[in-house]
Amino acid sequence: MATPVPLGLQGAYALGQRSTYDELRTKLLDVASELLISAGPESLTVRRIAAEAGCATTVIYTMFGSKEGLAEALYLEGFERFRRRLAAVPARTDPFEYLQSLGPAYREAALAEPGYYSLMFERAIPGFVPSERARTLARAALNLFDRVIADCISAGYLTPTQPRKIADALWAAAQGAISLERAGHLPDAQTYTVVTNATINQFVVAREH
């Protein structure tokens, strides 16, 4: 009977395998995102992506199942990258200051990776419609806003209401300004700052002097 491999070694091997898988998956998604920007949605064929990434087409089918599965993975990866950028913003003791600091981070996330953004918000792939599960997960990636807004309400800064109501209003304002900026109609972040601050101010509790 063979001597059992120590569990520590098995765990290390499994971790190494997972790391390699994650790296390849990220590479494939990045290749697809770059192709979307540089060559258009028609370039997103399994064969083209595999060639650009230097792997077999079977790898893509194994990881994503189909071209549609790849598109949904891109969609979710884009929101996950948003989540990570927002999570990297240092927390503040004052929740209202924290909320205000998240606004610039959201804009930076939107402008940093145009391939992902175009798929997430601009229907860059004709015919692709995210599943209901994907939409739920996408919105959950922005839940940090909901939590910080809830803290602002508890601290008396914002009108008591559903945090999601304020978060969605803020999201809509931010997206409008970002879309205009991406289209070249706005030269910088000034309008983004104005409209997002104005949206938050609609819910600010008036304080007695």
Image (spheres, rainbow, N blue to C red):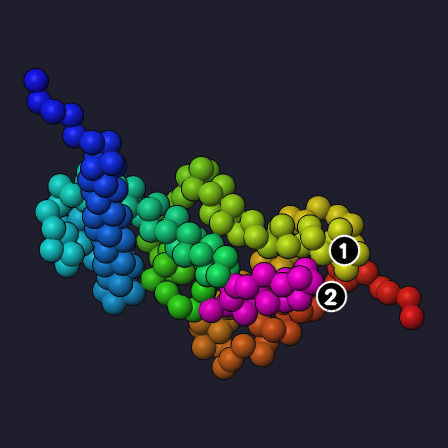
Q: Position of residue 87 (x, y in %)?
A: 50, 57
Residue 116, relative to residue 147: is it above or below?
below
Q: Nearer the viewer, residue 110 or 96?
A: 96
Which contiguous range is marked in magenta?
89-108
Residue 123 inside the magenta-drawn segment: no
Q: Nearer the viewer, residue 32 or 22?
A: 22
In the drawing, does residue 3 fall left or right of residue 111? left
Instruction: Determine the residue positioned at 29% across, 65% down.
Output: 37
Res 129 visible: yes
Residue 92 inside the magenta-drawn segment: yes
Q: Position of residue 6 (x, y in %)?
A: 20, 31
Q: Nearer the viewer, residue 124 or 198?
A: 198
Q: Nearer the viewer, residue 64 or 81?
A: 81
Figure disc tally: 2
Residue topped by disc 2: 201
Q: Main secondary structure of the magenta part?
A: helix
Alpha-carbon neighbours of circle 2 within 10 Å: few (<14), some, or many (≥20)? few
Instruction: Determine the residue positioned at 26% across, 63% down.
Output: 34
Residue topped by disc 1: 155
